[in-house]
Image (tube, helix red, strand yellow):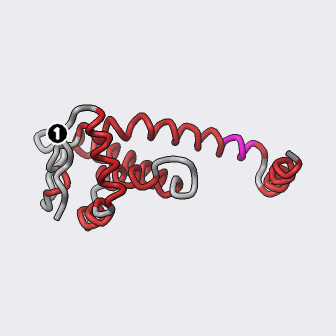
Amino acid sequence: MNTMLTVYDELAALVPPGALITITIVSVVMFFGTILLIPVIIIRLPVDYFLHDEEHVWLEGYHPVLRYAGLLIKNSIGLVFLLAGIAMLVLPGQGLLTMVIGVSLLDFPGKRAIEHRLLTKPMVFNAMNAIRQKFDKPPFSQPA
């Protein structure tokens, strides 16, 4: 118990207590948020989502203002997921899965190559298919 208090005291000397509370709250929200949102996103993706190399235009038939607003929101959410996934590599959470979801929501050149690199890790691909199986969805097709 003394060790925990010593670590807390040393940390409190470096970071203000208000910031520690904020960091703790953000970590807890990210942890539970990703636990709730990742399955929803994974089960909504089509089975062949990771097989397509061509980029599709998101909200293609909508007014340009609505389309750009939607893209801004989608990319912002993707960036949050990507950063949360990177943080979860050292914090509690599903780091690699969160990173896959973040990358899939972002629009940038080379996105498919990064998705492919993450999905060729059997642990990530199998975890995504296990989530789909729990919700009676067919597994993703394996990217080549």
Q: What is the residue that sits farthest to the right in this orientation? A: 2
Q: Residue at x 46, y 53 (%)?
A: 95
Mark 1 Cα-neighbour bin, 10 Å: few <14, some 14–19, many ≥20? few
Quadrant of the image occupied by residue 29: top right
Q: Position of residue 3 (x, y in %)?
A: 85, 52
Q: What is the residue that sits farthest to the top in this orientation? A: 135
Q: To which residue does mark 1 refer?
A: 63
* Secondary element at image label 1: loop
In the rendered structure, the answer to whether residue 15 lies left or right of residue 45 reads right
In the rendered structure, the answer to whether residue 138 lies left or right of residue 98 reads left
Q: Is residue 100 or residue 75 the one in the foreground?
A: 100
In the rendered structure, the answer to whether residue 133 lies left or right of residue 99 reads left
Residue span colored magenta: 18-22
* Quarter placement of the C terminus: bottom left
Q: Position of residue 26 (x, y in %)?
A: 59, 42
Quadrant of the image occupied by residue 59: top left
Name the dominant secondary structure of the magenta segment: helix
Q: Residue at x 20, y 48 (%)?
A: 140
Q: Is residue 82 or residue 127 the one in the foreground?
A: 127
